[in-house]
Structures are given as structure tokens and as C-alpha cells.
Image: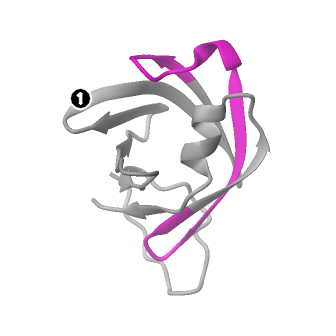
Amino acid sequence: MTEQTITPGTPATTFPTGTFTYTVGDASPIVEFDGHGGVTVTLDGEVIVTASYKVLGDVIEVVDEGSPYATPEYGVGRYKWRLEGQALTFSVIEDKSKARLKSFAVPWTRSA
């Protein structure tokens, strides 16, 4: 995991790797960015989405690859990202996947 020191109130300039969590409804999935372009989303210990990602400055592109809740048929989702302290937030640029839009609409919190 790439460590970086963030001054409160100052956005990060390098996309963070590691583990994050977010809550949508009653579910709180765990998202792990491996730092090598891979993303794994788990819920209650079960992998629900595997995906790949690419970061271009303050934009992240995500493509679902497999698992029960993946939506690879919708192609690339593009979001502006921002990390302040432990909070990772996203603003949609373009995404046809309603499931992914719902997940990226809420703040994520770094958990490891």
C-alpha cells in the first residue's frame, strides 16, 4: 500500500491504494484498490465485484470484470476523485451502470 501524508483540508494528488468502505442502504461493502489496476469489492466476506481501474490525474476509469454484481456490459465508468483526510469522494463524469453510479455516489472511508 502506498502511504501518503495528507494535511486535513488538503486534497491528495496521488490516487490512494488500500481498503475503503461505504454504505448504501443496509450494505457496507469493502473496496480494495491493489495499486496495480485491480479492484475487489467484498460484502460479508464474499467477492461481489472484480474490476480494473486506471487513474489519469484526478480522473479514475473503472471497468467491471466479473462476479455476481459486476456490470461489464456497461463498459467504462469515469469519475473525478478527491481524497481529503480519510474520505474518498467521486463526481460522475460518465457511467451507464446504475449499480456503479449508486456505489460511487456516496463518500468512501479509508479503513486500511
- Residue 86 shows in this picture: yes
**Where is residue 79 drawn, in percent x and y?**
71, 46
| Nearer to us in this view, 33 or 27 | 27
- The local secondary structure at tag 1 comes to strand
**Where is residue 69 drawn, in percent x and y?**
45, 23
Q: What quarter of the picture does the C terminus occupy?
A: bottom left
**Residue located farthest toward the front when viewing the structure as drawn:** 26
Q: Quadrant of residue 22?
A: bottom left
**Where is residue 93 drawn, in percent x and y?**
80, 45
| Residue shown at 36% from the left, 47% from the top | 27
Reading the image, the residue beneath label 1 is 46
Residue 36 located left or right of residue 98: left
**Where is residue 108 drawn, in percent x and y?**
47, 59
**Residue located farthest toward the right when viewing the structure as drawn:** 93
Image position of 86 with respect to 58: above or below: below
**Residue located farthest toward the bottom when viewing the structure as drawn:** 8
- Residue 54 shows in this picture: no
Image position of 86 with respect to 112: above or below: below
| Nearer to us in this view, 6 or 83 | 83
| Nearer to us in this view, 98 or 25 | 25
| Residue shown at 49% from the left, 32% from the top | 37
What are the residue bounds of the magenta stretch?
Answer: 64-88
The magenta stretch spans residue 74: yes
Query: Exactly how many numbered labels are in the figure?
Result: 1
Q: Quadrant of residue 56?
A: top right
Image position of 39 with respect to 8: above or below: above
> How was the colour assigned to the protein in this rendering?
one colour
Circle 1 packing at 10 Å, graded few (<14), some (14-19), many (20+), is few
Specify the amino acid type for callout 1.
Glu
